Amino acid sequence: MPNKPTKREEQAPIQAIRPLLKNQAIQLSPLVNQISNIPPADQQLEYYFIPIQFMKEYKPYHRPGRPFKNLKLVNYDKPAISLSFFYKHKYTIERTVSHIQVVQHIKNYRDELLNRTLFQQLSYNEQKDLQRSDEILRTIRQRPDTYQACFSNYHHKYYYWYCTYRYFDDLASMKTTTSSEHLLKHTERPGHQVHERLNIIFIDPEYISEPVPHDHKIVDRELDTFPIQLRQGITTLYLRET
């Protein structure tokens, strides 16, 4: 069974953090930076690229093993020298479940439908679900081995953006390591209340930059106008008649 994510409980003061992000965040582009597959504009996803020189200002919010519910420092202490993003269906399957867990889940499901009848009339499908859950609950209590069970959130369609980043594991030897993290997204609760969740990705501006690809073509075209080329060592003298 896949490892369950660390449970997030506490809230970070994101309204106090937003002014920092506004002044420090920079934009990255595939044309000038080592970054690929940037997520398209999405109201559910909010992330910021923060240069390495500001990273220590976020140290109070770096809590390994005790993450905030509404703030993720994606790669604190591991500023990215390259970035890529990908979209993934994230789910778990729990195959080792107890009889008590199964009974409790069915009972909760049935009770939720029963409580709904106090305020509204159930649809035809909901009435069938209520009848079926009652029958299953009765059967499984009498004959526990009737069903094989597992728990999963697969059909809830939890899709997340992931960030893959490369960083210097040892700057002295220029050794690099690659890691991936899923990004937090805004959530909406009944009543259309939106819970904001921020992602902060630290980058090393010096190493994440690269020449614009078409710049090479411009330079090639310019140097081709010098027909005389005299190479000596690592330098070439380009000449053309005036």
Image (cartoon, rainbow, N blue to C red):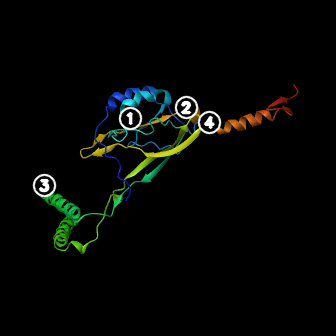
The label number, if any, that marks residue 119 in the structure image: 3
| Whole-percent x, y for residue 140 in the image | 19, 71
Q: Earlier in the sequence, mark 4 or mark 3?
A: 3
Q: Nearer the viewer, mark 4 or mark 3?
A: 4
Q: Which amino acid, by three-letter code, is at mark 2?
A: Pro
As shown in the figure, which amino acid type bears the numbered disc 4?
Glu
Residue at 75% x, 37% y: name it: 220
Q: Amino acid at mark 1?
A: His
Residue appearing at x 31%, y 43% in the figure: 8
Between marks 4 and 2, how big is the CA–CA gap? 10 Å
Residue 34 drawn at (x, y percent): 57, 39
Q: CA distance from mark 3 to mark 1?
A: 46 Å
* Crowding near the residue tagged with mark 1, few <14, some 14–19, many ≥20 C-alpha atoms within 10 Å: some
Whether residue 174 is visible, yes or no, is: yes
Asked if residue 105 lies left or right of residue 231, the reply is left
Measured from the top left, where is residue 40 in percent x and y?
47, 44
SS category of the residue bearing label 2? helix
User: Which residue is label 2 attached to?
Assistant: 205
Secondary structure of the residue carrying numbered label 4: loop
Write down the residue under mark 1: 62
How far apart are the two marked residues, 4 and 3, measured between alpha carbons?
62 Å
Q: Answer whether labels 4 and 1 touch (C-beta < 8 Å).
A: no
Tell whether label 1 touches label 3 (CB within 8 Å).
Answer: no
